Image (cartoon, rainbow, N blue to C red):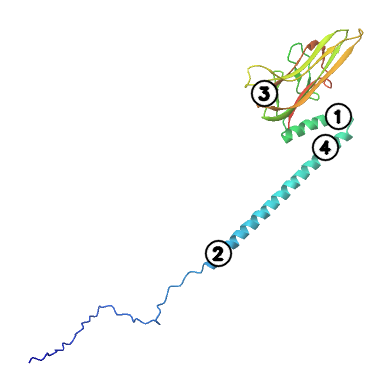
Amino acid sequence: MHQNQSYLHPQMFWTTQHANPTLPNHPNVFLPQPPFPDLRKKRSKDGTCTCLLIIFLLVLLALTGVGLGTYKIVELQRELDQIKEISGDTENTPSMEKLVDLGKQLEKKEGRLAAHVTGKEGKSLPLAWEDTFGRAFTAGIQYKNRGLIVNQTGLHYLYSSVYFRGTSCQNKKLAHVVYKKSFRYPSELNLMENVEYHRCADSGIWGRHSYLGAVFNLTIYDILYVNVSDVRLVNFDESKTFFGIYKL
C-alpha cells in the first residue's frame, strides 16, 4: 500500500529596500485632505467695491444736476436783468426795438429754427423780402433768392400775410399763394392759397388783407416762396406784409 505523503514546502518572501510600503486597510484611517479656498471673503470684497462704485456714480450724477440747475438759474437771472434794463431805458432807443433785438439773440442762442421776413419793394415775382432790418430775423432758416430754405425735416408752422391796396376803383382778382420747390418734385407745389374778388363801389382808396397759416411736414432743402396776382397792389409795410416759418 502506498500512503500519500504530504510535503510541506516553506514559503519565502523577498523584500527590497526600494519597495513601496503597504498602507493599512483600515476603515477608521483617513488621509489628510488639502484645504479648500474660502470664496466668501472674496465675494464680500467684490460686493463692497460694487456698492462703493454705485454710490460714487450717484453722487457724481447729483452734483452734475445741481451744477446744471445753478447755471440755468444764473442765465435766467441775467436775461431778466437785461429785460429790466431795457424796459427802464427810453431815452435813446424805443424799448420795443430793444426787445425785438433781445428776442433775436435768444432765438439764435436757443438754436430754434425760425424766420420772419418782412415786405420789401419789388416789381417782379415771387415776392422779395427783408431778412435783416426792422422786425425781420432768421435763425437756423436761410433766406436766399427770395425764398426760405428748410434746414431740417419735420413739422413746421408756415404763415404769410399780404396787404393789397389800391388808389382807384378797380375790379380785381386778388390771389395770394404760398408754394414750395423741392428736389423730389419737378414742378412747384402750392401749399396755401387765397383768392378773392375785389369789387369797388366808388373811386376812393381801398385795401384788402389776406392771411395764410398752417402746419406742414417739410423736408430739408425745400424752398418756400410767396406769389400774388399783382405785385403793384401790394403794400410793403412790415406790419402788414410778412412771411415766416418756425419748426415745431
Going by the numbered disc 3, the residue's amino acid type is Asp
Quadrant containing the N terminus is: bottom left
State if disc 3 and disc 2 touch (CB < 8 Å).
no
The earlier-in-sequence mark between 2 and 3 is 2
Tag shown at residue 96: 1
* Mark 4, secondary structure of its residue: helix
Horizontal and vertical percent for residue 152?
67, 29
Residue that appears at 56% across and 62% down? 46
* Mark 1, secondary structure of its residue: helix
Going by the numbered disc 2, the residue's amino acid type is Arg
Q: What is the distance, in whole Å, between disc 1 and disc 3 at their CAs?
A: 33 Å
Residue, disc 3: 222
Residue, disc 2: 43
State if disc 4 and disc 2 touch (CB < 8 Å).
no
Q: Quadrant of residue 11?
A: bottom left
Tag shown at residue 82: 4
In terms of depth relative to the viewer, which is nearer, 161 or 237?
Answer: 161
61 shown above or below 171: below
Horizontal and vertical percent for residue 148?
71, 23
178 shown above or below 2: above
